[in-house]
Image (cartoon, grey):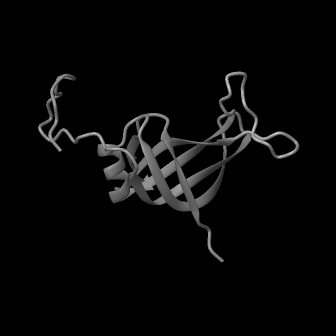
Amino acid sequence: MQNLVILAGNVGATPEARTTQGGTRITHFSLATSRPKRDSDGKVIKDRDGYRVEDTEWHRITCFNGIGKTVEEYVEKGMKVMVRGRIHYTSWTDQDDIKRYGTEIIADEVTFLTRAKPADRSGNDMPDDEEIPF
């Protein structure tokens, strides 16, 4: 048996990265996936303008080390990516001593479906109007 997840969607916010005391790099980002909303007969629901109504689900994606570094460097809000990984369930006790539960996707691969943001290797911010050759 295998725990395998493949998701394709839009990145919801700029990835956040941190390093553990042991030196492991961990990067998190949110991914939105959507599917058509259906009625009780299984037909796709459309709005009054004829566009299909969609249900959006948000997924917490966690990347480690090299994958996390690449995501942190090149992924930005709004990009389309495909994530291949596994579902991981977590539980913890919050500061009010309440047991909490969460679900995340541990990424084994992140594939860019739209052009990645350019890495700024100079350490300087480039003006928004400057073109970047690819």
Furthest residue toward left: 122
Q: Is residue 67 left or right of residue 38?
A: left
> Looking at the picture, does residue 122 appear above or below residue 49?
below
Residue 79 in which image quadrant:
top left
- At 23% from the left and 40% from the top, the residue drawn is 118
- At 82% from the left and 46% from the top, the residue drawn is 42
Q: Is residue 92 visible?
A: yes
Residue 45 in which image quadrant:
top right
Q: Is residue 104 left or right of residue 70?
A: right
- At 59% from the left and 51% from the top, the residue drawn is 104
Furthest residue toward right: 40
Residue 131 coordinates in the image, percent (x, y):
16, 31
Task: Tell how many labels.
Answer: 0
Q: Nearer the viewer, residue 46 or 134?
A: 46
Q: Is residue 60 left or right of residue 15?
A: right
Residue 54 coordinates in the image, percent (x, y):
67, 36
Furthest residue toward bottom: 1
> Looking at the picture, does residue 24 appear above or below residue 96?
below
Residue 34 in which image quadrant:
top right
Quadrant placement of the C terminus: top left
Q: Is residue 22 visible?
A: no
- At 38% from the left and 44% from the top, the residue drawn is 18
Quadrant placement of the N terminus: bottom right
Residue 100 coordinates in the image, percent (x, y):
70, 43
Residue 20 coordinates in the image, percent (x, y):
40, 51
Q: Is residue 125 left or right of residue 112?
A: left
